[in-house]
Image (tube, rainbow, N blue to C red):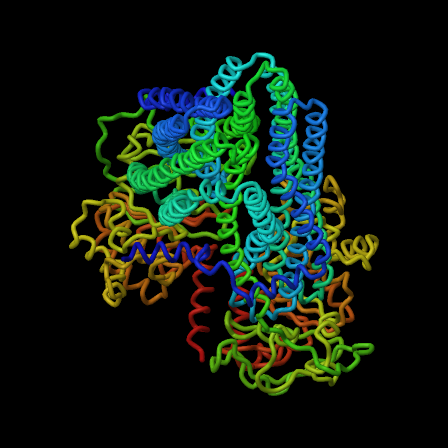
Amino acid sequence: MTYLKRLLPYLKVYKKKLLLGFTVIVFGAVFTNIIPFVISRAIDSIKTNVEFSSLGGYALITVGFALLSGVFLYFTRQTIIVVSREIENDLRNDFVTHIREQDLQYFHFHPTGEVMALATNDISAVRNFLGPGIMYSSETFINFIMALSLMLSLNVHLTLIAVLPIPLISYVVYRVGKSINYKFERVQSQFSDLTTRAQENLAGIKVVKSYVRENSEYEIFERESKNYQEKNMSLAIVQSFSFPMMFLLTGISVVIVLYIGGNMVIDGSLSIGQLTAFIIYLGLLTWPIIAFGWIVNLTQRANASMMRLCHVFDSKPEINDTEITDNNITAIKGEIEFRDVSFKYGTDLPFVLKDINLKIKNGETIGIIGHTGSGKSSIINLIPRLFDSVNGEILIDGINIKKIPLNVLRSSIGYVPQETFLFSDTIENNISYGNEKLDKEKIIAASKISQLYKDIDLLPKRFEAILGERGINLSGGQKQRASIARAIAVNPKILILDDAFSAVDTYTEEEILSGLRDVMENRTTILISHRVSTLKNSDRIIVLKDGRIVETGTHASLIQQEGIYADIYFKQLLEQELEKLD
Amino acid sequence: MAEEKEKKDINEDEVIGKAYDSHLMRRLLQYLKPYRWLVILAIVLTIGVSLATTIRPYLTKIAVDNYIINKDEIGLRNIILILFGTLIFQGILQYSMTYLTQWIGQKTIYDLRMNLFKHLQQLSMNFFDRNPVGRLVTRLTNDIEVLNEMFSSGIVMVFADIFTIAGILFFMFSLSWQLTLISLSVIIPLAYATVIFRKKVRIAYRDVRFLIAKMNSFLQEHVSGILVVKIFNKENKMKDDFEKINYDHTAANKKSVLYYSVFFPIVELIGAISVALIIWYGGGKVVQGALTLGILISFIQYAEMFFRPIRDLSEKYNIMQTAMASSERIFNLMDQKTIIPDPEKPLELKNVKGNIEFKDVYFAYIKDEHVLKNISFSIKQGEKIAFVGATGAGKTTIINLLCRFYDVQKGEILLDGINIKDIRKEDLRKNISLVLQDIFLFSDTIENNINLSNENIPLEKVKKAAEIIGIDNFIDKLPNGYQQNVKERGVTLSQGQRQLITFARALVYEPKILILDEATSSVDTHSEILIQNAIEKLMEGRTSIIIAHRLSTIQKCDKIIVMHKGEIRESGTHQQLLELGGIYSKLYQLQYKESLAQ
């Protein structure tokens, strides 16, 4: 239960409310448990032939106590369950706070689905422990004490007999619960295998059909399906067993009480009302006894979940401001230098950049070209410190980028990632994402440069149009242009475009580039592209191959070199010619 | 308003429909039919369980009135033994019934799932073009899972609840009808409170679900777009925006907590009122001698017992509602009839030679947007033909038609002079091996990926194919050899190796016709030579159709057909086409430059 200790600071915040909650539980339990006592008195009074009106009195007291216990029950839920919701809220906020700080590396190894599971399933498991878990366990505990002492006050001998099976019941519930958990997990894992097979079959349906494998696919799926059914049945055996078993055990204790108690009534050592009270108390105790085992399971689950959450809470990002950060740096100019930079994405993975030496002057425009996997994107990912280089150093304005505060560095860079990513928000909010205080004119200006404005003008809600699944769908090219507008809108010192024109046609590309020319004039610009047309006007073009710079020069000088660049260029010329054919 | 609509959208996949639809129900019950005797047995068992449960307070009454009050110790012992017997009896019956219903549920959903799977296998490619895989997987898994609950606990348990209520009412009325009416008079306010509560909670839950969906999509989006968040320095905005949604979510949850905090005490209060009424009215009657003490005590027990099945029934309502919605989606899928039909009297294919002919073929995926126009060509047995052309020229469509993934709209395709519409799809496809551009491997062993789990292809044959293709050395080095699962952690197959596996797959089926659809385009130069050799081996003695960007692969082909915008523009040998100086020669120059660049 070591990880659950980490919840203490969260609980402390709501100390008063929780204290009130526990007090209320005690009062609620008092009135709940006193009712059978009242009933026993009422029944005994019937036997002694009292006045009719005093029965009405007992009835009124029963209702009155039930009312009071109800009021306390209300406050119990309003305190403890509400606090569990509050802590869930705090925990989730803290989770997001930590997750956003993780390095990109973290997300490489933890897919989105895994992060989502932490934020939803694991936090829910912890909340279940905090809310129902704490409430029922304290209720159970207090009810148990109350009922036990009231039973003892009625008759010691009978009480001892009545509570005899209780430890056994709790143990059975605990064991059965454990076995159910285990079997349930096996069912879940088989369910995911079944899902995988279905998914693969449907994704590869063309292969299945062309090799006429429908029947064998059916057999394989049948096997998985059967296996799933068997695992479910193995769970069902235990599950079907658990409830009848619990009711049998609690039922047996009622029967024993009835027998021994009945005999005691016969020999006069117990009144009939007291016997009734005992039977009612046993009814009251049934739930707490069952709940006990359930709570133990709940706690174990919460502990496992809390452990996973603590991994996130405890993992500190490596890319962050440190003691070497110079907070006096509040702005940069834009000169970039790579000195003997090598980089790989993981310790046991191969180097993707090798001995990169490159100096980009302030205001210069650099083009980078090379085949897939040559290291183009890796080189530019190092500049905003999305990753840190393994060897060598990167300097901006002659200062090691690790000394520049991260927010200064990143807010000076306008970046158009290779994979366009827009939020399900309005177009306006997407463009002004990097700079929320941007006025409308600048947003419009940015959208004009990226040639998106005309498209926006055609939308019914224009800049207010919401993108994404539940909004409008932009074409790939439109999305890319929005992503360019977003980068320009930051008014960056360094502008990085990573294959930013792949989804727009060459004509639009030309238009965007000519619009960008003014923007690029006094800032350092890095253009990555597969297309020569994008780069040919750059001040300098570098060609990457297998993580190394193999050619450098202007368009004209590279053509003369007749190397990789020239090959790519001629190939693309031919392609254009082909396209023009009809 | 917009938010309301959004809420509706999000909940669309959930409960909105009716709890009972006779048409759907009839179809669902079809699946219970094979197990009808077991269902009936389960229902009989529930009668036993209900009887055993409801008789106990009655037996308690006898114990009190007849034996405890009369000080009859032997009688008491006997009635206790009976009580004990009913407990054991009930335990056994309840266990058998629960197990039986689970069994029936599992069997039926198994049948249903396999039925749906079989149906999906028969649907044409046209259907799969239109339906995302994710949605189909949900139908096969989650939607069917929902029905499990209905089959297992839904139908039979409804009977259990009804029988229990009936049993309680029977015993109560037989003991004292006046006291029954008085103690159960509280049902009216209880029903009223329940209806209001359910309504409120449903709305509250709808809000909660909406906000959970909102929260999840926010997280989903920001985690998958974390690069953009970081690069624009927006970690703080992410946190602030999330906190807002989270706050709303907590608030909505607190609202539903409030309803529960009110409802549960009210239920208990109503129960207490019922007990108070029994004490007040029944107690008075006992004093007057009109009722016995035992009756009074048993009524207190019945009052406690009565409310559970009523609460359960309202839960069953929810189960039925979700089940109806799911079954509607499942049956909609089952009713899809986009199947390419087999001929009623199929012609037998014997000793396929592999002569292929396209005669004036026209085809459009979307009406009137022809991707193939007036396509005619013929391939003789054992010939090697290549199709070249730019992306979207219609090369892959020709293959789709030849395999009859789609049917031509005009013209005909002949195999050995027989129209392919006159033979069974299975017979046609058995003679064709297709290697696709998108390499597809199952999360299964290498062996099963090569022979596609075909038991008629023994491991030796698989090994032989791997050897011919030239991947046997690599496979032998894997920790588990041919039994190595290709998607296990730590096993990384290069693109080239994956491609070679699909080649071995094509070879092991010994087709008369081999089709390679851009099968070499995604391979690094290192594997290129291996693959070249493999292709040569593959094509030996077969009619082969190759679609390739790399012209080096196809120079030796008997004929090259150049496609452009859905039409055949040039055809001839490599040399003839180069001399022609048309599209092919341009493409060739392009490739030549590319190979230089490598």
- The extreme front residue here reads B288
* Count of numbered tags: 0
How far across and down, in percent of the image, does residue B539 sit? 73, 67
Give the answer, above or below, for where A156 lies relative to A500: above
B445 in relation to A566, above or below: above
* Residue A525 coordinates in the image, percent (x, y): 30, 48
One can see residue A232 in this view: no
Q: In which quarter of the image is residue A500?
A: bottom left
Q: Quadrant of the C terminus of chain A?
A: bottom left
- Across and down, in percent, residue B477 comes to 74, 42
Residue at image point 45% right, 39% down: A120
In the image: residue A46, left or right of residue A64: right
Q: Which of B380 and B137 is in front in this view?
A: B137
Q: In which quarter of the image is residue A183?
A: top right
Residue A29 in view in this figure: yes
Pick the residue in front: A33 or B580.
A33
Residue at point 65%, 76% (across, down) = B402
A197 sits to left or right of A63: right
Give the residue at x 46% y 56%.
B13
Query: What is the x, y in percent for residue B280?
Result: 43, 32
Position of residue B542 relative to residue B528, above or below, is: below
- The one nearer the camera, A557 or A184, is A184
Left or right: residue B476 compared with residue B328: right
